[in-house]
Image (cartoon, rainbow, N blue to C red):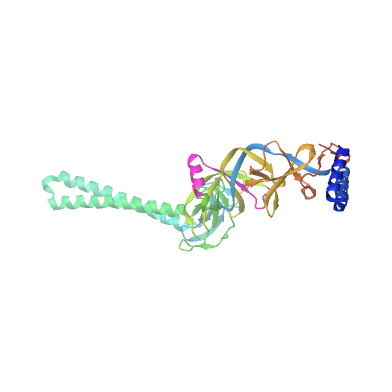
Amino acid sequence: MKRSRTIWWVVVLVALGGGGYYGWHKYKAAEAAKATQQAAAARRPAIPVSTAKVEKADFPVYLTGLGTVQGFNTVQVRTRVDGQIDKIAFTEGQMVKEGDLLAEIDPRPYQAAYDQAVAKKAQDEANIANANLDLQRYTKLGEFATRQQLDTQRSTVAQLTAQISADDAAIFNAKTQLDYTQVKAPISGVVGLRQVDIGNIVNAATQTGIVSIAQVEPISVIFTAPEDQLPYISEAQALSPLKVIAITTDGKKVLAEGKLAVINNQVDVTSGTIRLKAVFDNKNHALWPGQSVSTRLLVKTLKDATVAPDQAIQHSTNGLYAYTVGADNKAEMHKVKVSYSIDGRSVVEEGLTPGQLAITGGQFKVEPGTIVSTAVASSDAAQAKVRQE
């Protein structure tokens, strides 16, 4: 073959004359340079890289956002009667149940009013008993009693009967006021900082409360989502309540999982977002009123999606690309299109196929056609080695 090529060049030289002589040497120089490059490439060591397989898997699509934790119910406990605080029955930060005693106001004035109302009823009951006896006597007298006397006595009995009803109402009101001297928890939850001390005078007309109670089981989180996602959220929510995950703002710890409960009735036109409310059981009290959290709203799950690690996706001025390990351990570059990315994984719509071995580390030394090797983990770190694949 080499001899034939030489003869061919001799013919060319004869045809070209003296200029062909220089062409011959130029050709030989190019052949030598190519051989040198191939020899250098053969001697060049393989570049160590880390890899991961491109997989086909179900991929959950989350909408991420920021939210604020709110007590499911929050109550500012105030007194409903005036008086002096005689007792504080709670500890700041304590969990209380509905109906637990929180504070006690001096009950003596209200006890006296109650006793007075009871006594007034007893007096009126005695009067009506006597009036009924007189009415019976006038009735038995028949023609010996005037019609006017009989009608007057009947009116007296009716008036005293109405007075008994008024006494019952007065007793009920006095009992209610007396009960209000014991301030009880209207809901179950966590009490906040005490706002009054023993000996303080409280007044029902003022806005100063005794303490606040926040219900934390369950608890809610208010967060926002872009308005363009509203149709997808509404459609999915109509099928079943959507899952919401609350995470610390640094993204390192999952706090709780709950359900989307409410989609607000209007979009905020200034920000182009819709407010959403999620509810969490919060049995471990990981969420606390006023806390800022990151939220993830599961809108849908992509079935059998092509998934690759985020580290495999590289950026350039021409777009996204990724390297894979091809035949003879040579790196191959692929332009890719990514639709979603979360938790270190990306959905690749174009450019990669399941089963390919994507390069996830060491790409800065890799070029198309570069021979690569994969680091193999050993049980003994000192014996870790590089295996040519």
Count of marks placed on residues: 0
Say whether residue 366 is left or right of residue 318. Answer: right
Q: Position of residue 116 (x, y in %)?
A: 39, 55
Q: Position of residue 358 (x, y in %)?
A: 73, 41
Q: Nearer the viewer, residue 306 or 342?
A: 306
Q: Nearer the viewer, residue 216 or 38?
A: 38
Q: Would you say residue 175 is visible in this rendering? A: yes
Q: Would you say residue 218 is visible in this rendering? A: no
Say whether residue 314 is left or right of residue 34. Answer: left
Q: Nearer the viewer, residue 74 or 350?
A: 350
**Residue interval drawn in magenta:** 230-252
Say whether residue 290 is left or right of residue 155. Answer: right
Residue 314, magenta (yes or no):
no
Q: Nearer the viewer, residue 200 or 253?
A: 253
Q: Is residue 180 above or below residue 333?
A: below
Q: Residue furthest left?
A: 143
Q: Quadrant of residue 347?
A: top right
Q: Quadrant of residue 244?
A: top right
Quadrant occupied by the C terminus:
top right
Identify the residue at image location x=48%, y=42%.
238
Quadrant occupied by the N terminus:
top right
Say whether residue 261 is left or right of residue 308. Answer: left
Identify the residue at image location x=14%, y=45%.
141
Q: Position of residue 271 (x, y in %)?
A: 53, 59
